[in-house]
Amino acid sequence: MKKSILFSVLVVVIAVVAISCKKTPAEPDDQKSKEALITSVTTQGFTLTGTNITGVIAKEAPLNSVKLDFTISAKATAVPASGSTFDLTSTKTIVVTAEDGTTKTTYNVSASNATQ
């Protein structure tokens, strides 16, 4: 009789422990944002067209030290970040990654000096 009661208590304890150890799932990837966009460029003289950012800077301004400010999708990250200084003597890229960590958009950045 004692063994039967002890066995029943043990089964109940194991069941309670098993149920309480069930993990809460992390936020599913389908609920994380897949938006990886540059939505605007705020540096004077630069425009955003599709995945190209082009600019015309002052005739005397050095192309090897251009600060670029831009806005990206909420919860996304950009490498390099907005406010970074670029050497635009050749085309550079910015990669925007969405919150989901897998959706990425690559932007080409270029500039030239004004002729006058």
Image (tube, rainbow, N blue to C red):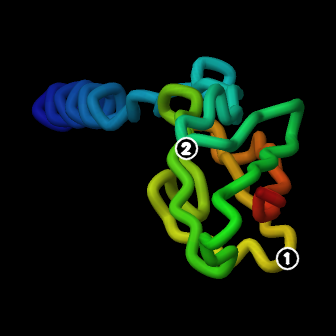
Q: Is residue 113 above or below residue 76?
A: below
Q: In x, y percent, where is residue 17?
A: 26, 35
Q: Residue at x 81, y 48 (%)?
A: 54
Is residue 103 rendered to the left or right of residue 29?
A: right
In which quadrant will I find the C terminus? bottom right
Q: Is residue 7 above or below residue 46?
A: above
Mark closer to the chain start, 1 or 2: 2
Q: Amino acid at mark 1?
A: Ser
Indicate which disc residue 43 carries: 2
Q: Residue at x 59, y 18 (%)?
A: 31
**Residue 36 image-quadrant placement:** top right
Is residue 45 rendered to the left or right of residue 48?
A: left
**Residue 13 image-quadrant placement:** top left
Q: Is residue 18 above or below residue 107?
A: above
Q: In x, y percent, where is residue 106?
A: 82, 51
Q: In x, y percent, where is residue 81?
A: 51, 57
Q: Nearer the viewer, residue 93 or 101?
A: 93
Q: Residue at x 61, y 36 (%)?
A: 41
Q: Residue at x 53, y 70 (%)?
A: 85
Say few, some or many: other residues with alpha carbon within 10 Å of mark 1 (under 14 / 14 to 19 / 20 or more).
few
Indicate which disc residue 63 carries: none
Is residue 11 rendered to the left or right of residue 104?
A: left
Per the model, the C-alpha gap separating discs 1 and 2 is: 18 Å
Indicate which disc residue 90 carries: 1
Element under disc 1: loop
Q: Nearer the viewer, residue 29 or 96?
A: 96
